[in-house]
Image (tube, rainbow, N blue to C red):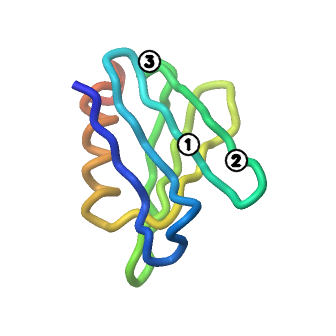
């Protein structure tokens, strides 16, 4: 059931952000040249999802409860919409 989405390699082919779904929650891996972050959020801890569409790529903002928002960048518009749909379908209070 695990689905994985990677940000576009067009803008940054080395440091691609990754979203990975599993049964209990979703992992967000934000890669940077030096360091990066890896966050796991249970579906029940997500209070919202927002998409900022640019000309070619989208930024996704995940709003967890009682934690800072998670920002993942450079996803295609289609992937951003699909990620939002999958999260909202699995979050008990938002679906």
Q: Along the polypeptide, which appears first: circle 3 or circle 1?
A: 1
User: Which structural element holds mark 1?
Assistant: strand
Q: Along the polypeptide, which appears first: circle 2 or circle 1?
A: 1
Number of on-image labels: 3
Residue 6 to residue 39: above or below: below
Q: How far across and down, in percent of the image, does residue 6 sit?
A: 40, 54
Crowding near the residue tagged with mark 2, few <14, some 14–19, many ≥20 C-alpha atoms within 10 Å: few
Q: Nearer the viewer, mark 3 or mark 1?
A: 1
Q: Along the polypeptide, which appears first: circle 3 or circle 2?
A: 2
The residue shown at (34%, 67%) is 76
Look at mark 2 in the image and give the residue it sits on. Answer: 36
| Circle 3/circle 1 CB separation < 8 Å | no
Residue 75 to residue 89: above or below: below
Q: How far across and down, in percent of the image, does residue 73 sit?
A: 52, 61
User: Which structural element holds mark 3?
Assistant: helix
Left or right of 17? Residue 1 is left
Crowding near the residue tagged with mark 3, few <14, some 14–19, many ≥20 C-alpha atoms within 10 Å: some
């Amino acid at each position: 059931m695990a689905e994985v989405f990677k940000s576009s390699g067009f803008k940054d082919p080395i440091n691609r952000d990754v979203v990975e779904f599993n049964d209990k929650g979703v992992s967000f891996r934000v890669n940077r040249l030096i360091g990066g972050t890896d966050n796991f959020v249970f579906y029940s801890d997500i209070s919202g999802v927002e998409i900022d569409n640019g000309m070619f790529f989208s930024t996704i903002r995940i709003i967890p409860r009682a934690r800072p928002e998670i920002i993942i960048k450079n996803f295609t518009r289609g992937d951003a919409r699909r990620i939002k749909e999958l999260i909202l379908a699995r979050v008990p209070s938002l679906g």
